[in-house]
Amino acid sequence: MRRIRANAIAILTVAWILGTFYYLWQDNKPQSTPEGAWQRGRGHAQKPGAAPGRLEIHPIDGTIPLIVSQPPRPEQSQLLGGFNEKVYLSAKQLKAGDDPYREHAFNLQESDRLGGERAIRDTRHYRCATLSYDADLPSTTIIITFHNEARSTLLRTVKSVLMRSPPSLIQEVLLIDDFSSDPEDCQLLAQIPKVRCLRNGRREGLIRSRVRGATSASAPILTFLDSHCEVNTDWLQPMIQRVKEDHTRVVSPIIDVISLDNFAYLAASADLRGGFDWSLHFKWEQIPIEQKMARSDPTLPIRTPVIAGGIFVMDKSWFNHLGQYDTHMDIWGGENFELSFRVWMCGGSLEILPCSRVGHVFRKRHPYDFPEGNALTYIKNTRRAAEVWMDEYKQFYYSARPSAQGKAFGSITERLSLRRKLNCKPFRWYMENVYPELRVPEQAAMSSVLRQAGLCLENRRTDGPVLAECRSIGASRPSSQKWELVEPLIRQQDLCLAISTFSAGSKVKMELCNAKEPRQKWKPKGTSLLHMVSGLCLDSQTPTGPVVVAQCRPLVASQVWEPQVVT
Ligand code: UD2
Ligand code: MN
């Protein structure tokens, strides 16, 4: 009896150890294989007969076993048709003694050493591998525009797409050669099945080149890529799925980092979204903390105020309906803001999908020339975006970028009429609903005192907002009597005037500003300050008592507020 029990315990222990090992292996399994990934599609079974990966020790912590991809299998050569990779790559070699960074602003020697493809780590959260996608996803045209791209990076972009996407989803890969010095960089690649090459007769810049690509695309979905990317395992399905479910969504992957020095493929943080400052400078920023806390599932999409611009998937009809791009923008820059504002304000949305990963070589400088100069081109493009989409908020762009004033930006009549035709929402809506975290600059918002019959609205630390004697310290007012009226907020530093409840008689208090909070929304109306949601007006009741909201009675003394700009 005792022996049976001992055996049972031994068997259970072994089973437990095996189970734990299997579990750990599942957790760390993802490792892209150029040949294996596109077999996955809906299910996650390996292709019958596929060679299993080799077990290797994790290079960083030395403990976790990983599957490392096998070298390409013979059927891959079919993927390339008559294209001769060796000839293509070896035709252009870095000469001994040449600076490997000079031509492309990344280490060309390292890129060339990697050749046309390589295995990269699957950087997704492990739960992504358990998701499944519709079997009947629509197909896409991959649009890659480039100007003097290195052959090795361009080829890896194209090959990674062909190898790590379900073939049925790739209608074609459309290369737009933006007047590169050597037409063969593009033309030779067109020998690869599904790859087409269009060459511009003059330098157009990436914006007009993408529009050319989109116009010539035959699939119902457009996928844009830069010319120095490597797509990762199952990158495409999550994006097409989201667009299929709602054609107004414009989706991006998480953009992993390919080192410009050694070409290591590095996982980017999964907690970032796109943002910008008032000079219209793009930046990655943390997801706001409330949204982060609410994210129970790391595979869920992340709403983003703007996209980085280079890598996204969009329904073709929606792209056309929304006015493609502003084709008066030149070379590079600004088009991502213009597209992002337009998508949000005209009825769509932007998101980043954590289960889709694409690597990109981020560079520190532009390796190509700007015929009109880099700075002037960026100003022209962003100025067009600001003038067409940012309404009264464009003043903050001009204060952040004073050099933009007076610079030529061409006619925007067509884009303004597009905005009217599409019946797009005001930029204020975007600020309140999409990007409330973007602070209006302090120095740009003018401070005022709010006078009422010789008294001033003052925020007291203990009593909150009250009417008090107007004071000054030297030439200026104490900060407790200075208010910034930045619609819809009435603010003092980080605090904003808010009602407590939505009923008449509700006391007014100060709380952390949030332009989306209905209790904080005010607007001047005649001589009154109207609380926009309750329809009540700011009222002092008695000169020294608490300030409240009450039924609006225009011109009644306790509701008359006189903003007066102060220093
Ligand atoms: C980022 C975007 C890029 C674009 C840009 C703003 C990513 C990963 N990249 O800059 O796609 O939205 O912000 O405009 O989000 N190119 C041409 N013709 C030109 C200049 C460039 O075809 O005259 C190509 C270029 O070869 C590349 C792409 O356009 O494939 C983007 O250019 P980049 O890589 O220099 O831009 P990047 O990544 O710094
Ligand atoms: Mn790029």
Image: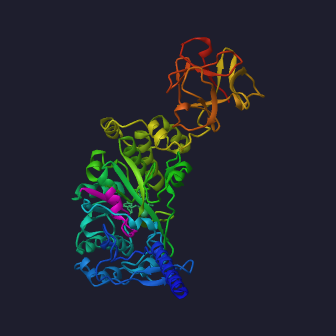
Question: Residue placed farthest to the front in the image?
Answer: 1
Q: Is residue 462 depicted above or below 75 in this figure? A: above
Q: Is residue 233 magenta?
A: yes
Q: Residue 171's x, y, as percent? A: 23, 64
Residue span colored magenta: 220-241
Q: Is residue 120 depicted above or below 139 in this figure? A: below
Tell which of 375 and 64 is nearer to you.
64
Q: Residue 560's x, y, as percent? A: 60, 16
Tell me which residue sits at (30%, 71%) in the image: 162
Does residue 221 appear left or right of residue 532 in this picture?
Answer: left
Residue 146 in view of the camera: no
Q: Residue 5's x, y, as percent? A: 53, 83
Q: Residue 227's x, y, as percent? A: 37, 66
Q: Is residue 469 magenta?
A: no
Figure quarter occupied by ligand 2 = bottom left
Question: Residue placed farthest to the top in the image?
Answer: 556
Tell me which residue sits at (77%, 28%) in the image: 473
Q: What colour scheme does the image use? A: rainbow
Does residue 502 appear left or right of residue 146 in this picture?
Answer: right
Residue 252 in view of the camera: yes
Tell which of 229 and 498 is nearer to you.
498
Tell me which residue sits at (51%, 74%) in the image: 261
Q: Quadrant of residue 348?
A: top left
Tell me which residue sits at (39%, 41%) in the image: 345
